[in-house]
């Protein structure tokens, strides 16, 4: 078999979570048809998952469903009245090959990915496969010093400053992903705490940012990169109890000044860089023992 064929079949064995869009919006069943149509329009989507308040999938609705409902004078109806309830889903254990077979067999335009508790993790469309497949090989491998290639799983999430409603969603998805990989509870707890604190620091202090996780055979790297005011005095910022959070944020129960100290305590290696008026980059490395 030619080398290109080996690479292709190797990619087909990768988990579908590497292809899925993990930053999909979620919609509660009581949202109105016209509201959901605007959500899809703004996000340039043609389908969206309907979940309960715990994030569990209860249905799916497409732009076609919404436009049809509006034509039938149901623009003010709840989206649960028109959603598809019997949804075919993928799980984190499914591979890219499984996803391709699902598209062939069912002929649907999208498949939600859910965990064993039906919690919605992301969505997979044929376009996701087309876009992600060329770069997937580069993302899943790194070269070790001895020349051996090792698999690297990369997850990336966008985080909006001030978005306290969705704050913590990215770190929850990371935690569930690690649980599905079967890692130890201690490692999962440390990664969950570090990623949550990084995510909430973006929500509390920055305009916007992203949370990146890279999982390899011997370590997990978590990196938060934000656009924001930056940190004037890093030495003060890493001291327990020191905080620059606004009174409004403190009233919401955040900004106690333990974010960076908690990240440090969970990390085997820690680094922070910040430029005032530009933003901050925080890196945590946790070794898998």
Image (cartoon, grey):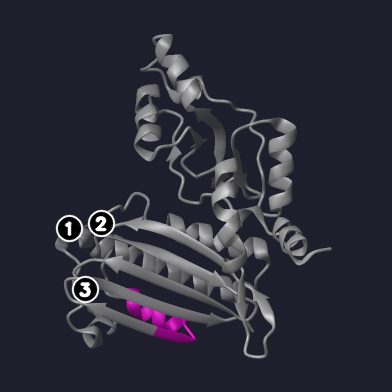
- Picture coordinates of residue 162, whole percent (x, y): 26, 55
How far across and how far down the image is residue 96, in percent?
A: 69, 52
Q: Which residues are magenta?
A: 259-270
Residue drawn at (67%, 90%), measured in percent from left and top? Answer: 146
Residue 154 lies within the magenta run: no
On the rendered structure, is 221 left or right of 271? right
Which is nearer the eye, 277 or 200?
277
Task: Judge the density around disc 1: few (<14), some (14-19), many (≥20) Cα neighbours within 10 Å.
Answer: few
Residue 142: name its quadrant. bottom right
Label 3 residue SS: loop
Mark 2 element type: loop
Asked if the residues shown at circle 3 and circle 1 are in contact, with their CB atoms under 8 angstroms apart, the answer is no
Quadrant of the rendered structure where residue 40 is? top left
> Where is mark 1, residue-wise?
248
Please tell me which residue is depicted at 40% across the width and 37% down the height of the picture.
Answer: 44
Q: Residues within 10 Å of mark 3 (few under 14, many from 20)?
A: some
Q: Nearer the viewer, residue 241 or 283?
A: 283
Q: Which residue is mark 2?
A: 252
Name the outermost residue toward the front.
Answer: 2
- Name the N-terminal-most of marks 3 and 1: 3
Q: Picture coordinates of residue 36 (x, y %)?
A: 39, 29
| Left or right, residue 89 beside residue 158 | right
Q: Separation of disc 1 and disc 2 at Cα?
A: 7 Å
Dot 1: element: helix
In 3D space, how far apart are the residues under numbered discs 2 and 3 (Cα atoms)?
Answer: 22 Å
Q: Is residue 76 left or right of residue 178?
A: left
User: Magenta stretch: dominant SS?
Assistant: helix
Q: To which residue does mark 3 refer?
A: 230
Q: Residue at x 44, y 79 (%)?
A: 284
* Residue 94 visible in image: no
């Amino acid at each position: 078999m030619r080398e290109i064929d080996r690479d292709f079949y190797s990619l087909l064995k990768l988990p579908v979570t590497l292809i899925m869009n993990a930053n999909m919006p979620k919609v509660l069943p009581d949202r109105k048809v016209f509201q959901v149509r605007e959500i899809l329009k703004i996000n340039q989507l043609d389908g969206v998952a309907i979940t309960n308040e715990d994030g569990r999938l209860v249905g799916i609705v497409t732009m076609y469903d919404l436009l049809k409902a509006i034509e039938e004078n149901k623009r003010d109806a709840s989206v649960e009245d028109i959603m598809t309830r019997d949804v075919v889903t993928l799980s984190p254990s499914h591979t890219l090959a499984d996803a391709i077979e699902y598209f062939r067999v069912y002929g649907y335009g999208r498949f939600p990915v859910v965990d064993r508790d039906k919690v919605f993790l992301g969505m997979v469309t044929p376009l996701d496969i087309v876009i992600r497949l060329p770069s997937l090989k580069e993302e899943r491998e790194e070269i070790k010093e001895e020349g051996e290639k090792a698999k690297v799983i990369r997850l990336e999430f966008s985080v909006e400053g001030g978005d306290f409603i969705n704050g913590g969603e990215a770190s929850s998805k990371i935690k569930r992903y690690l649980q599905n990989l079967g890692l130890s509870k201690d490692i999962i707890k440390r990664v969950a705490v570090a990623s949550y604190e990084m995510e909430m620091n973006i929500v509390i202090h920055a305009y916007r940012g992203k949370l990146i996780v890279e999982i390899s055979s011997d370590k997990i790297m978590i990196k938060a990169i934000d656009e924001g005011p930056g940190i004037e005095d890093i030495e003060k910022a890493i001291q327990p109890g020191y905080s620059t959070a606004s009174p409004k944020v403190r009233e919401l129960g955040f900004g106690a000044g333990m974010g960076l100290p908690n990240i440090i305590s969970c990390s085997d290696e820690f680094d922070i860089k910040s430029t005032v008026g530009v933003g901050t980059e925080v890196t945590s490395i946790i070794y898998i023992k």
